[in-house]
Amino acid sequence: MRRLWIGLTYLVFFVLIAAPLGRMTMGAFSEGWSGFWNALTRPEALHALLMTGYVVVVVTLLNTLFGIMTALYLVRANWLGRRLKSLLNSIVDLPYAVSPVIGGLMIVLLLGPDSALGALFEQIGVKIVYAFPGMVIATLFVTFPLMVREVMPVLQEIGSQQEEAASTLGAYGWTTFWKVTWPSIRWAVIYGVILTVARSLGEFGAVLVVSGNIMNRTQTATTLVYQDVENFNVTAAGGIALVLAAFSAGLLLLMEWSKRRKGGH
Amino acid sequence: MHVEVRGLDKHFGDFHAVKDVHFGITKGHLIGLLGPSGGGKTSILRMLAGLETPDSGEIIFHGRAVNHLPPQEREIGFVFQNYALFKHMTVFENIAFGLKVKKASKSVIRDRVTELVELTGLKGFESRYPHQLSGGQRQRVAFARALAPEPQLLLLDEPFAAIDAKIRQELRSWLRELIERVGITSIFVTHDQDEAIEVADEIMIINQGRLEQKGTPWDIYKEPKTPFVATFIGESTLIGSASELKGFEGAGGGKPTKALIRPEYIEVGHLHEFKIASATEQGVVKHLHFRGSEWLVEVEINGHKLVTYRSLEKETLTPGQEISVLVHRAYLFNEERSWIQENGLKKDPMPVFI
Amino acid sequence: MNSLIRHKGWTWGFRSTVVLYFVILIVLPILGVYYNSFSSGLGSFTESVSDPIAWKSVLLTLKLAVIAAITNVLLGTMIAWVLIRYKFRGRALLNSLVDLPFALPTAVGGLMILLLLGPGSLIGGLAESLGFTIVFHQPAIVIAMVFVTFPFVIRAVQPLLEELDASEEEAAYTMGAKPSRVFFQVILPSMAPGMIGGGMLAFSRALAEFGAVVLVAGNIPGRTLVSSVYIFGEVESDNPAGAAAVSIILLTLSFLILWLISLMQMRGRRS
């Protein structure tokens, strides 16, 4: 029995994860090293990777900052009524339920060139949809719950007494946060950052809709993979995908590591 | 620091936690806030600290209203029930925190922390982390940390609740001494009457958000002002109708009046042991419990069960034995008032008419 | 009291920034979609939805997501069981690999499946010689959905199995119960909340999946065109109203599931 179950488990992992991964690696190198290298050093590929990098950096910064603040408010603030707090708390999860394509569509509807807001921005010369800001907003929408959901349970667990103790000892908000709260939530934040990087690196649906996938302008690594596949350029797609997969695997290792630290601290 | 509180009121949603509380505290006194859990003691303490904002009322330190001041500026020390030590800081860093925040110089910090470490008997533990300490040691760190910035008022929320019964006893007398030596005005919250009676100069009894009585432990014990205080402090038995007791006929002037009777108000024995036999009543011994240093006796008179203690030196009683019972005094109360009344027959000797 | 967020002048600035961020980023866009699809009346909404391509795509998505979720409940429960109950070589590795589909960009996942099962590949060729194709047909979509939602059930069941007290099982054995009986009456009931919760999460994620699916589905209306791809197509062909109409069906469904899950969790916590 035991053997059968373990064997079956290995089989599932092989079929679902190892084989596709291996096949993609083979695909990327089907034209040898040079094929792989050429796929990566195409100008549009370099630009797409750069674009993904920019989005990841901006989104991670914003999401970390606002995620921590939102978590702090949702757990600690008593200027929000209890009902309002529980309502906001359930809204945090909404992006999980929203298909990325729909997330992208929302932003096009709200800020697209045909919308009132979009027209307004266009007039001051800021293009949002089919441009970098739109891609950042779309990715922010998708990654919003990640940081909040990592930090909130830790804040709830440590309680507010240590912070209150600090305030009775004369420490104001800023000192209290850095000296008392931050050391406790540090590992949760790091874990949240890794999750955010992974998610924004791989975001596809929302960015595809919002960016318009314009080559050398708004194309990201994932949307380039899509375009390559549409153009039947499987080798090139495989090359980019392999780079992305390598990043993801690295992030997965980091996740395992920070999970251990988070649990152990 | 002289503390005065006027008309303090606080709601949490629909819950009326603190109702129109007034009191004043003399400088240097140690005050116990005593009452059942959920009665509003902790809310009062947290409002004094500035951790909660009162709905209305004034808090006055040294003649100055501090309602608008945040906790940082009230010059208080607060010891939390679970100590709330900074768990990622060592004992030294914990105690030094308040001084560092005030930007005290390194040498001042070192001297003050060393002094407090010695005062609290934590020498040798300076570089330990809270999770490496026992409950009692954590408690001492919490004291030292609260005292480090030299506060004017020390507030303690159930300071001994999380400590083993045995060490608790030790810590109580230690705290009493420490506070006397430092000479700081202190208020502590507790639900344990022994703790309050033993440690406090003055006790405030808080129930359902109201201040029921304030006074020295002896005053409160001797002259409870409300039925709640009478039942809460000491042991007592409640008798539904006071006039059914011998010597209390007509108590309350015909109004339905209840009586609370403490064990030490009652004397039991053979008829010949009493000076005024006419004030006694016949009862039956129901149960006897050995309490280490005395007997706890349950007697029944007129269908009422009363509890009293009896010295081991006296003749041992047996259950079912008939016995004379004298109720020396009772705490009586009805809807209008409450008072202590002595047994009428005892004080009213017959020979007056001769 | 929040002594933390109390720094006089900053307070209002911080508060309003966070609330605004929240409203603009999350609330406004979602309301926007609902508003947009009903803005020109209920008529245009029903018109958009009654387009056979549209409603067929919704039905197809539901059907395939159900199949994918059930597959995952079965596979996931088995894997969770094996990873918790048996000690064997490579267990730790497999346990970390479980999260890979979360970490991997979905488009990469789609490409991997495309390459593995596509017409030129070994497996694809084998299937073709047997007379059916996988890629660009419904099986490929299901596989993509299973891949993307792979970790949900495993991660939901694992902690329950870990918590399960061995003495409960042993007690059943001492009372003479057969292994199969113990499994169905002791172990399965304690895994059930994780299986249901994880399965619902997997289902809602499968409903929403786009990246992996768009690469392997043939996007043939009525047969392999799922809703998210349909929505994308409508956006591309400049028909946001049609896209919004199908979107709100999908959205409402997802919200319903999210709500059910949180309801379940609340009940679970209470008991």
Image (tube, coloured by chain):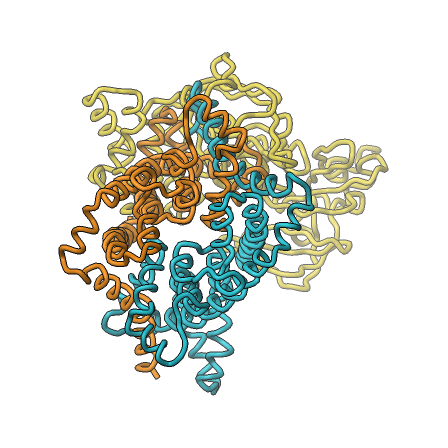
Chain colours: A orange, B yellow, C cyan
Is there any visible trace of residue A113 in the rendered image? Answer: yes
B99 or A197, which lies in front?
Answer: A197
Which residue: 68% across, 56% down?
Answer: B299
In the rendered image, residue C114, in percent from the top left (x then y), is placed at 34, 63
Q: Is residue C136 left or right of residue B353?
A: left
Q: Quadrant of residue B27?
A: top left
C246 or B311, which lies in front?
Answer: C246
In the rendered image, residue A37, in percent from the top left (x then y), is placed at 16, 52
User: Looking at the picture, does residue B289 appear above or below residue A188?
Assistant: below
Q: Is residue B240 left or right of residue B126?
A: right
Q: Quadrant of residue C139?
A: bottom left
Q: Locate the C terminus of chain B and report the quarter of the image it occupies.
A: top right
Which residue: 79% across, 45% down?
Answer: B241
In the rendered image, residue C264, in percent from the top left (x then y), is placed at 55, 58
Q: How many marks?
A: 0
- Residue at the outermost left position: A33
In the rendered image, residue C261, in percent from the top left (x then y), is placed at 54, 56
Q: Locate the N terminus of chain B and report the quarter of the image it occupies.
A: top left
User: Looking at the picture, does residue A186 appear above or below residue A35?
Assistant: above
- Residue at the outermost right position: B254
- Residue at the outermost top position: B63
Q: Quadrant of residue B296?
A: bottom right
Is there any visible trace of residue A155 in the rendered image? Answer: no
B65 or B189, which lies in front?
Answer: B65
Q: Is residue C208 left or right of residue C212?
A: right
User: Looking at the picture, does residue C16 appear above or below residue A264?
Assistant: above
Which residue: 37% across, 47% down?
Answer: A203
A30 or A103, which lies in front?
Answer: A30
